[in-house]
Image (spheres, helix red, strand yellow):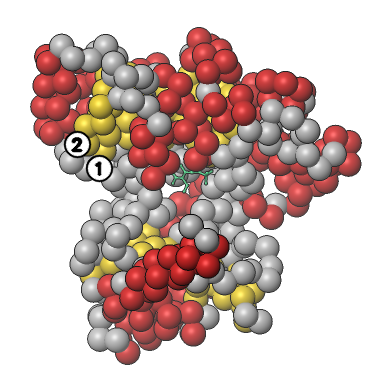
Amino acid sequence: MTSQTFALYLRQQLAELKAQGLFNTIEPLESANGPIIRMNGRSLINLSSNNYLGLASDTRLVAAAIEATQAFGAGSGAVRTINGTLQLHAKLDEKLAAFKQTEAALSFQSGFNCNMAAISAVMGADDAILSDELNHASIIDGCRLTKSAVIRYRHSDMNDLRAKAKEARESGKYKNIMVITDGVFSMDGDIAKLPEIVDIAEAFDLITYVDDAHGSGVLGGGAGTVKHFGLSARIDIQIGTLSKAVGVVGGYVAGSRELIEWLKVRSRPFLFSTAMPPGSVAACIAAIDILQGSKELQDRLWENAAYLQRGLKELGFSIGHTQTPITPCILGNEEATQQFSTRLYEEGVYAKAIVFPTVPKGSGRIRNMPTAAHTKEMLDQALAVYEKVGHELDLI
Ligand code: PMP
């Protein structure tokens, strides 16, 4: 293909996406990602980050990052298995194991990489994976990297999971079978039914895998969804991100000593991609220390979430069945949702519209993410804008 034909091909693909309303433009921030952001020269109340605890610009994390960068450089210089593992990485891994109350843990360059790494390192061609239909894209991609049979079960439908687990086990076709789920589902904020999942797993001898990207630092006193249900001893593999509640970048896998040893020799992103930079590692360590030292930020997050959710419900909006700070405002129609988000933006609130294909058709929503760093005044201001735009578009 000549470069001109290739460019033409891409132009046509892009035009198709635009025609379907699926093209996304990215507006760069002119400030740190906090409760108030600057964009296009304007200040906006930010309800769209994953910065749950406001740690992304916490001065203690910034100071730790600067100090480690000055001492150890901007980059780590190699993959973890050659000589990119600094003592800082080893310290972070130890801290993460203590934080998650598992025998061992291993950090990676992103939460996305953890799913690429862990699923493909433990599952093979003779195996099957039972996966919740609403699992995150990185789980779906991690499953694709295996040669395992992937069997999707209906979202949080325990009868469907039990039936599919029974069928898979009784077929005699598979050596290992894994059940894999998000701990907290990112579009609706509902929590996986882990106690029932674990019972089913034990009945049919399944490996259990929980991606707790949205539960870590938020549920279970900070340790996450597994701890929230008191199931630490009954889940085989947990992953978490260092990019959401922890506020930096990276991810980790937590589990048995054997699991972590296996990942160190078999997980491809660990073996073939350069280690996290020292500044980020040091900032993560500072964040974990803060999380373990006090529940203050988590309490504030939950208070703010309850306040925003109560306010939206009182205005007459539907927030679905969230059980966590993730606060969808479900409007239904895709166009109305996009229009709502645009009007919020014009009135000073940044809250992204999420529509098909990220969520099912007809369940378009504004996804609000309150954080510990928001003040009541900011949330009141946002609610006032919601009320104004809701009336204006005849949605409440
Ligand atoms: N898993 C889930 C459930 C997520 O929501 C995300 C973040 N979007 C990830 C994994 C990936 O994490 P990271 O952004 O740290 O790569």
Instruction: Residue 117: give x, y in percent of width and height.
Output: 49, 28
Left or right: where 290 falls relative to 125: right
Number of numbered tags placed on the structure image: 2
Left or right: where 62 falls relative to 165: right
* Residue 194 seen in the current view: no
> Residue 308, located in which quarter of the rendered image?
bottom left
Label 2 Cα crowd, 10 Å radius (few <14 / some 14-19 / many 20+): many
Q: Residue at x 23, y 73 (%)?
A: 333
Left or right: where 45 falls relative to 80: left
Q: Which mark is residue 72?
A: none
Q: Amino acid at mark 2?
A: Tyr
Q: Residue at x 23, y 59 (%)?
A: 360
Question: Disc 1 beta carbon < 8 A from ligand 1?
Answer: no
Residue positioned most to the bottom: 392
Q: Residue at x 32, y 82 (%)?
A: 390
Left or right: where 165 falls relative to 74: left
Residue 76 lies, with reference to residue 93, above or below; the image says below
**Relative to the observer, which residue lies in front, 233 or 173?**
173
Q: In the rendered structure, which disc, 1 or 2, sits on the residue that comes first in sequence? A: 1
Q: Which residue is mark 1?
A: 133
Q: Quadrant of the C terminus?
A: bottom left
Instruction: Residue 119: give x, y in percent of width and height.
Output: 41, 27
Whether tag 1 and tag 2 are in contact, CB under 8 A, the answer is: yes
* Residue 66 seen in the current view: yes
Instruction: Residue 370: give x, y in percent of width and height.
Output: 48, 60
Residue 155 lies, with reference to residue 350, above or below; the image says above
Label 1 Cα crowd, 10 Å radius (few <14 / some 14-19 / many 20+): some
Tag 2, which secondary structure?
strand
> Residue 191, located in which quarter of the rendered image?
top left
